[in-house]
Image: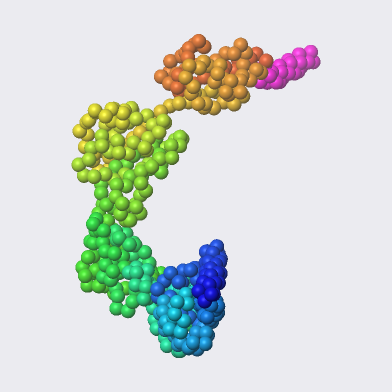
Amino acid sequence: MRHSKFFCALMALSLVTVFVFSQTSSLSDLSEAEGDTNVPNAQLAMSLSYYPVTAGDVYTLTYAAAGNAVKYVIPVDTSYKIRVANLGVINCQGLSYMQLKSQVESIVIKNYPLSGVQFVLTAPSSFIVTVSGEVKETVECSAWSLTRLSSVVLPYLTNYASTRNITVTSSSGTSKNYDLFLARRNGDLSQDPYLRPGDTVTVNRFERKVKIEGAVERPGEYELCSGENLKELVEKYAGGLEPLADTSRIELVRTVTGNGDSGVKAYLSGEDIEKNKELVCYDSVYIFSYWNMKPVVFVEGAVSENVVLSTSNSNADKAQGAVLQSNGASLESMNRLIMPFNEGEDYSYFIRRNKNMFSANSDVEKAYILRDGKAIPINLNPILYDSTYYADFPMKANDTLIIPFRQFFVSVAGAVKNPGRYPYIPDRTWDYYVGLAGGFVKSQNSFDAVSIVDINGNKLSKTDVITPETTITASTNSFLYFFNQYGPVITTLASIISTTLTILITAEKL
């Protein structure tokens, strides 16, 4: 009989435990559904051995006593003293959840061995943290024991806020400053602490912000600490120089001079880095790359304007140009590209590496190079399409590679409704293009008379197939058109002559 009562109690305790965990899971699902990291999550809290017991936490204790299931809901208030049923009192301030769980279960097992004790966190604490200082406005943010400082302050910072000097004042009045840059850059989470009930966060104003760009590993804007200058900016914050950094060409732009000037530019060198040149707020540093000094050639004509050569992954090189690409759009106007190349490179390699700059309108067969005032023909067809072709044609700085347009139009002029240039279609005769131009103006043209001249000035007959850049002129030969044009003039002249003769005859009779 005693055993049956004991097992009934264990069954009842199991049901209570299932109920407790189902409540915990429901809270967890709610937090996950809301997708807010500042929403308390009991399942997450219990998965971390270091979760701190916090005022406002709600725990549930269940065990079997004398054959009966016992359940206690245990809240934690600001005194941090909790009563474990009628068995004892524990001061849980400074304890983690696992430490408190161990103490509670020890007390219950000491009094009720084999009681199947369970102690779970049912609802983690939620509290308010005040954020003020260099923020858009003073706000009260919802937080819980696993809310870090950064998630509370970052959404509210102004352009003048410091992330290197943020003060957190506890409910006891103790203040400590934190550096979120160190937390993000070095992973030092001690600089991005969990917040506690009663904390007040004050964001201080930065003292110096400077910018660095060009041939460094991590260009950007950085807030310097006291005593830090150019050396720390380059090596500590920007991650150091890139391999192609040209330390003989460093530009410093000083926006705030203190003299009322709008800005002053100074030229520095690697020696200034070693001497740790002093920087002031809003200074901007640019370090050039040797890539910027590579020789260039100019490519003009039927080439895509958005194609720019870049063979380096450095940030400085990306500032000079994008990765080679082409949108494949038809070219309608001449473009001019400035393209760097490597010393000793020849045109065969250069053309193949940059073949995407050409389109169907590029007449690569008739390309030529302008060098020292002379035109040097270069047929790019074999370079582009014959893998076995090789020609030792070295490039020279400031060459201009001209890519003519391939002609794909037919001009229609004269007595047609819409004179103009029309796309060339192979194997079409003159009447096709006259039709594109809207047909003849019948009042001007008789008997479909046309004059057809090809690109070389040769006259073609109506039976000939039209070739690119042919000009078709519809003749203006209508008698009625000319009569209407000159009839009024002839009539006026005849009237003048008739009047003159009448006057002369009348004068003779008199």
Report x, y in % for residue 318: 34, 52
Who's the residue at 59% across and 17% down the image?
A: 476
Name the image quarter holding the C terminus. top right
- Measuring from the top left, give residue 310's x and y in whole percent: 32, 47
Residue 270 in the figure: left or right of residue 408: left
As rendered, which of 99 and 198 lies closer to the eye? 99
In the image, residue 184 lies at what x, y percent?
A: 37, 68
Decide if residue 482 is on the left or right side of residue 73: right
Note whether 500 is above or below 131 in the view shown: above
Residue sitting at x 78%, y 15%: 506
The residue at the far right in this view is: 510
The residue lying toward the viewer, choosing from 114 and 100, is 114
- Whether residue 141 appears in magenta in the rendering, the answer is no
Occupied quadrant, residue 297: top left
Q: Quadrant of residue 190?
A: bottom left
Magenta stretch in the rendered image: 481-510
Q: Is residue 62 visible?
A: no
**Number of marks drawn:** 0
**Frontmost residue, 80 versus 66:** 66
* In magenta segment, residue 495: yes
Q: Residue at x 57, y 26 (%)?
A: 419
What residue do we see at 52% from left, 87% from top?
86
